[in-house]
Each structure stands twice: as structure tokens, then as C-alpha cells.
Image (cartoon, rainbow, N blue to C red):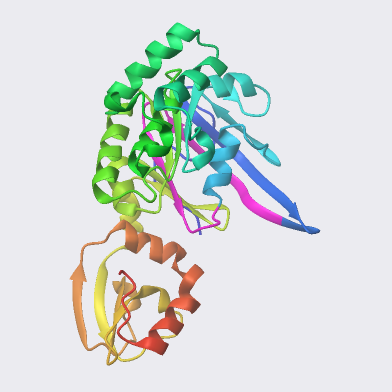
Amino acid sequence: MYYNVGVFGMGIFRPQSAISVQKVSKTFKYKGREIRAIQEVSFDQPKGSVWALVGHNGAGKTTLIKILSTLIIPSSGEAYVNGYSVTKEEKKVRASIGLVTVSERLLYYRLTGLDNLIFFASLQGLSLSEARRRGREIMELLGLGNWVDVPYMKYSTGMQRRLALARALLTDPPVMFMDEPTLGLDPLSARVFRELIRQISRTKTILMTSHYLKEVEELASNIVVMKRGKVAAIGTPQELKRIVGKVVEVKVREIPPGMGKFVVSSDGRSVTLRLPASYVDGLRVEEEREVEPTLDDLYIYLIGEQEEGERVERVRRGGGWTWRE
């Protein structure tokens, strides 16, 4: 089932859309087999908004970001970024975007932070003086002003991520793609990076991916939930939570068939499940309490069976295991 509870998301191009994805599919061939990475994905993201792609590993989030960044070509369908076709106007798309990923190959380890930015700004057509001025300006803006002459290899992970963001901002693009921008960062660095995203979003359109659903709820106005390469739901955080309905936590003796994805913890004597209230009928419940729905609940409701078998087996083997640890 596909839930489209937002205003945008139907895949019909609108002039106010910064990103328009229209029935985009991508198939890879590997050892004689066809792998469908994404299948007929459609949505329209309005200008000046922050949207997030969420889903399990292999859901197709990064593949879609690469298509929108013109790094790979879709097998079918069409997509537009800043009004330009990703298949017919690649240069105009590239001039309109900034890309932030977790790859360590984005920058050169032995160059200083500023020299890295000067190099990449020169590749994008800026003069040496303009590249130097722009590089210093952005590093100061992102809190790296005291590190302009320090080799990139000496930057912390959080600082490396900020320098990657600085590279993406060199040409002041109207659209930004961020693929798991806070992955691997400590809580303080992640908080700083989220604040940078908020500042940037005042003047730019941002499409990001993340597995941190609290972060997604904090930053994104709309969420595209992907499952096995398809769009499972689109809407605001509050709209998506309503898909799940009333949520309860219950204690039971055994994991009911097909409900392993709702396991929260096990103490060896009973198992705690967090699930939609409509699923409780027929269960032999020892304790029950109502809780506020979260995006985690939505994720488990729509996608959780991807890991259900492994989760159930771990509970049955060890007891005392807590999924949320």
C-alpha cells in the first residue's frame, strides 16, 4: 500500500518545484541478474523546503540522490532539478546543486582546508582570487576560520563533514543534496551540523537522507518513506504518524507470529511490544499502556519486517536483549 498524505508528491511537475521526480526507475545488472534499485519513484519538492528520504539499507535512497546529482542515469522516467532535466541538461543541473556525502574521497588529505576549497572552486570556474575569498568566507561561516591553513588529515570527523559542506556551498547553489550528513558524528558535532543545515535552509532547497528519525523530524517539513525501491508514504511528520494510529506498549509471554518487528525488549520472562492498538486484539496481554506515536513507530509499521526474522531469533536465543540499545 502507498500512502500519499501530503499536498505534493504525485509526480506532476509544478513550476514551484525545486525537485521533480517522475516515475524514475533504476535497474543494475550484476552477474547476469537484474537488480531493481528503485521503481517508479515520483514526488515534487517545492522550492525553499527541507525534505528527507528514509528507509532501510538498500531501499534506494542513495541511488535516487545519485540520479538527481547526475552521477548515474535513470533506466526510465525523468527528473528535474531547478527546472533542468537530469538526463538532457546535466551541466545546468550540476551548476544548480551542492552535494554532501560521507565519502572520505571528497577532499585531499594532505592539502589544507582552504587549499582544498580553492582547488575545487577553480574546477568550477572561479578565479584564483575569487576562490580564495569564497573559501575563507565559507570556512568562517561554518566555524572553521581558525583551521584554514591546517591539513585536512588533522581535522576531526565533524570538521571534515563541515569542510565537505563548505565545498558544496562554493558556488552558492540553490539546491543541496545531503546523504546521511551526520552519520558517525558524536552528539555535539551532529547538533552543530543540524544547526548549519537549519541556517542553510533559509535560502536553499535541501533533500537529505538519514536513518536518525528524530533528526529527520527536527529538520524536514516532509518525508518520503522508501521500501524496496518504491515510495511507501509521503507526508509531514505529523501526517505520517497518523497512518499508524493509536500506539500502545504491551507485555506478552511469547512473540506472536508475524509481530517480531514490534519487539522493544525482553527480560527473559516476558516480551515488550510497541505496536498499533488495532493489533492487540487476540493477544494475551499482561500489561498495556498507551504511548505517543513517533516516526520510529511509522518506520517499524511500514518497513520493520525487513529485519523481523533476525530480531525474533535474537530475542529467543538471548533473552534480556533490548532492540533500542
Rendering coords of residue 112 (x, y %): 42, 27
**Residue at 22 percent of width and 89 percent of height:** 286
From the viewer's perspective, tell me whether residue 308 is left or right of residue 284.
right
Camera-nearest residue between 229 and 124: 124
Rendering coords of residue 90 (x, y %): 63, 24
- Quadrant in the picture for the C terminus: bottom left
Rendering coords of residue 147 (x, y %): 32, 28
Residue 182 shows in this picture:
yes
Rendering coords of residue 92 (x, y %): 59, 18
Camera-nearest residue between 270 and 232: 270
Where 275 sits versus 167, above or below?
Answer: below
The majority secondary structure of the magenta stretch comes to strand
Where 215 sits versus 173, above or below?
Answer: below
Camera-nearest residue between 220 and 40: 220
**Residue at 47 percent of width and 25 percent of height:** 116
Residue 7 shows in this picture:
no
- Whether residue 47 is in magenta: the answer is yes
Where residue 284 sits, quadrant-wise, is: bottom left
**Residue at 45 percent of width and 13 percent of height:** 131
The boundaries of the magenta stretch are: 35-59
Q: Residue furthest right?
A: 32
Where 92 sits versus 50, above or below?
Answer: above
**Residue at 53 percent of width and 15 percent of height:** 122
- Whether residue 288 is in magenta: the answer is no
Where 199 sits versus 128, above or below?
Answer: below
